[in-house]
Image: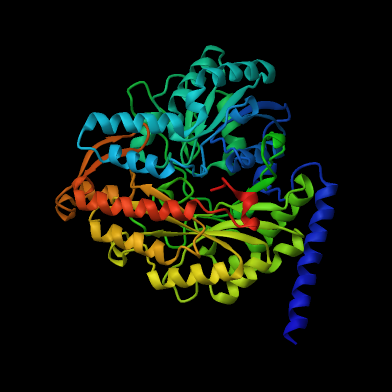
Amino acid sequence: MEEVKKKSKKSLWKSNFEMRRINYEKTSILPNTSPRLKAGLADDQITVLLVDLNNFSRYPTLPIGYLASILRASNVRVSVFAPLMVGVHGVTREARPHRFSLLAAKLNHRAATSGSAKIRQWRNRLATSRLSEVTAHEDHLIKEFQAELERARPQAVMISTYLMYRNVCERICAICHDQGIPVVIGGPYFAQPEVIKDWTGIPGLSALAAGEVELRLPAILKTLLAGGDVTLHQGMMTMDPQGEIRGRIATPEKELDAVHYPDFSDFPWSAYPNRIIPVVTGRGCGWGACTFCSDVTSTAGRTYRSRSPENVLGELASHYQRYRASRFVFTDLKLNSNVNMWRSLIAGMQDVVPGAQWIAAVHVGNEADTGLTESDLRAAAASGCVRLSTGLESGSQRLIDLMKKGTQLDAISAFLHNGSAAGISCRCTMILGYPGETAADVHASAEFLERHVDVIERVSLNRLQVIMGTTLHRNAIQKPGQQPANFSIVSTNPRTAQVEHHYGELETAPHRKAVMRLLAAVHRINSRELSPRAREFEGVM
């Protein structure tokens, strides 16, 4: 009887998606067109140049795909400029270890925790310069942008960016200002008042998009090109001549099924090692309490909202048909935030994309049902899941509790063993240097990795970065008396949302000795060959 129910459910999925495929082929615009977007602009076609300064080197950029789709549905002519199109690669992800990797990691930690401010600053500048080719080849990128501007002759330029590319944004704004072209900049971290105030002052910038504004884009563009006041639209921010900020941050978008499926047709597919499509099923995080997390304070991270399973599976089907893509990276902060969505994807994946392979991040939380039982993980592997990442952060339960992670080490251990047994490549992120961390905590992290060396395939160990707007940052400012005695905020930089801090414990001999042990444990895991199923996603975070 149970088998009959499963077959009936599969048949229903297939029927739904066959109808969606037929409708897709009959229409000249992308599927899932919202009535709110069909209103569009005037009949005269407008040209917009989208600039991608997120620039992922393994797959297209999701925000640009959404912008292109929404604008084209409103009869806007869209062109895309991405650094990868002109030979400039993006953020380096998961470099393969080499024979000197462990030594380099130890020296890097020593420099990062040096008692000398000059050494720390030198190390930070070096690390920033190596993070992305965009910063290393800025002049070439600007030259190619000017050529694209001449070719496309847009009436407006819209930039999607990380804060690290401020210099590039300033140069683009100056070029466009000289040619009388309005510029709008948006990105994931324009939800912090301090950052907004700093960025709206860029000369030549017409407006800053703060919050989720995609469904309002056609109306915003119409106002912008008419010379009207764009701050009348929620989410558009400007600076007046007196230096005052005008506008308000857009509230989180709740009608996620109303947003178009992203359009990735502009991206240089031949420049990617293989065809991988990014997909997001929900915005925000179902847990959303980790004190260090800046993702939940980003434009899309505020509160958790989910798409419907049918809408997501329909998108997967359309990408499979349009781009011949069967590999997907789910960019949700935690894909199991909505357990029903998680299980629906697992149940329907192979029906809509035969042979699909996919990766995601999950939260091994304390909730009654996280969707990560042994049988869930076996079903996920059967549906094409080849890799799952989770936030371990520390092998010390005391520190995990300080971080408000909402996880237990024994639950993470069970997840790692069950996932590995199911054939899933399991990965962990870890944080080094959290306020209150001691040498004993670091030894506990090393010991956890040493005990789980056979069921963890990769570890991403990151030195703590304090980001403006996080609970950790706000508490340090508002409740200084509750912070560890040797932890302090040194300075804040709203240009990049970075908060320089000092934690004296990291400079002690016992802590450094413990870190050396932890680095060795991480190196041992990361030096192993990837499992064959996960190799197609090597370098994808």
Q: Residue furthest bottom?
A: 1
Question: Quadrant location of residue 429?
Answer: bottom left
> Can residue 422 be seen from the camera position used here?
yes
The colour style of the image is rainbow
Q: Position of residue 196 (x, y in %)?
A: 39, 34
Which sits in the foreground, 481 or 35?
Answer: 481
Residue occupying the point 46% across, 34% down = 131
Q: Total of numbered circles in the picture?
A: 0
| Left/right of residue 392 with respect to residue 356 in the rendered view | left
| Left/right of residue 432 with respect to residue 205 in the rendered view | left
Residue occupying the point 44% across, 68% down = 412
Q: Position of residue 350 (x, y in %)?
A: 73, 63
Q: Residue furthest front?
A: 99
Residue occupying the point 26% across, 41% down = 113
> Can residue 471 be seen from the camera position used here?
no
Q: Is residue 418 above or below residue 273?
A: below
Q: Is residue 291 above or below residue 408?
A: above
